[in-house]
Amino acid sequence: MRYKNMLFKLYETEKSTILQVSGSINSYYNGNNSKNLNYSDLKAAIASLCEEIGIEPQNAKPINFELGCVIITTLDPSKIVKQMVSIKHAIPSKTNSNRGTLREFEFDEFYLKAYDRGKWLDLQEQLLALELKFTTYRSIAKHGIFTLADFNKKNLRSMAKFFLQTYKQLIIVDPRLYNSGLSKCRSSFVYQISCPEQWEEINKDKRNNWKSKYKQLLAEYLPFPSIHEEIMHSLKLEVSRFFGDNIFDDLTFNEKPDQLAL
């Protein structure tokens, strides 16, 4: 059955009856996903859900968990999504849906998803959704979360750090480079790195070489922050807003993304 955008299923086992609850806690609490939750909202939503179904938070185990942000962008979000080509060794495993362009990058215990949220909701705003879904209980437990009672600031900060560090590695070929007066040779390079399959076929050394050349082009031809820098800035603001304080006082970032083990 469905209730407040959540799906409820009962499973009978030899030892017990299990209630599985799935859906968006944001949609449950706010009615839709058009705005971001803050920490107080999340705690209130968990408490309300547990009260309504008559369970204690410490008795509810999350088997997967998705976190994300909706941010406003200066460029068309669909164009940005199309230029997301690679993260570490992964290229997009899914590139389209019945609602438009998206990108999914799959790893063993989580995946990233980016899409034009405004288009999905038939809104005029330029809204980009960036999500990370932990797909196993083990991947959630790595951040100290074993039950719904463990969704505290310390553990959520650990998840937030992983979320931001992972998106920091995402390679987005800035579409504004195409009209920036590049030479024929440099233009050919930009078109080459815009193809996800090209990143799949190269080794680590060449990957680092391409990233270095791409950063040089951004510095030389874009007199303003790249779209990736703009996205990371917005994500950091949203994460700080979620916690209601300056999370970056105790959040450090790996300045060499390829060294982050995934």
Image (cartoon, rainbow, N blue to C red):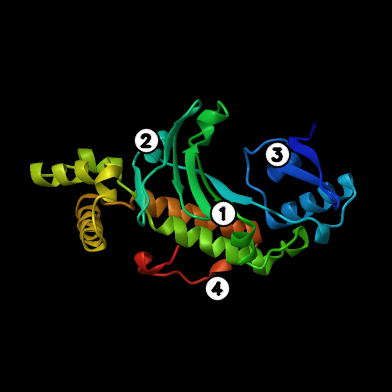
**Amino acid residing under circle 4:** Asp
Residue that numbered label 4 is attached to? 249
Kindly give the residue lying farthest to the front in the view shown: 14
Q: Decide: is 242 above or below 123.
A: below
Residue that numbered label 1 is attached to? 238
Distance, label 3 to label 1, CA atoms, is 18 Å
First in sequence: mark 4 or mark 2?
2
**Amino acid residing under circle 3:** Ser
First in sequence: mark 3 or mark 1?
3
* 4 and 1 marks in contact (CB < 8 Å): no
Distance, label 4 to label 1, CA atoms, is 15 Å
Q: Indicate the quadrant where residue 28 lies.
A: top right
Distance, label 3 to label 4, CA atoms, is 31 Å
First in sequence: mark 3 or mark 4?
3
| Mark 2, other Cα within 10 Å: few <14 / some 14–19 / many ≥20 | some
Distance, label 4 to label 2, CA atoms, is 33 Å
**Element at label 1:** helix
Image check: 54 left or right of 43? right
Check the picture and name the quadrant holding the C terminus: bottom left
First in sequence: mark 1 or mark 2?
2
Q: How many marks?
A: 4
Indicate which disc residue 27 carries. Answer: 3
Dot in front, 1 or 2: 2
Where residue 153 appears, as percent x and y from the top left, is 68, 66
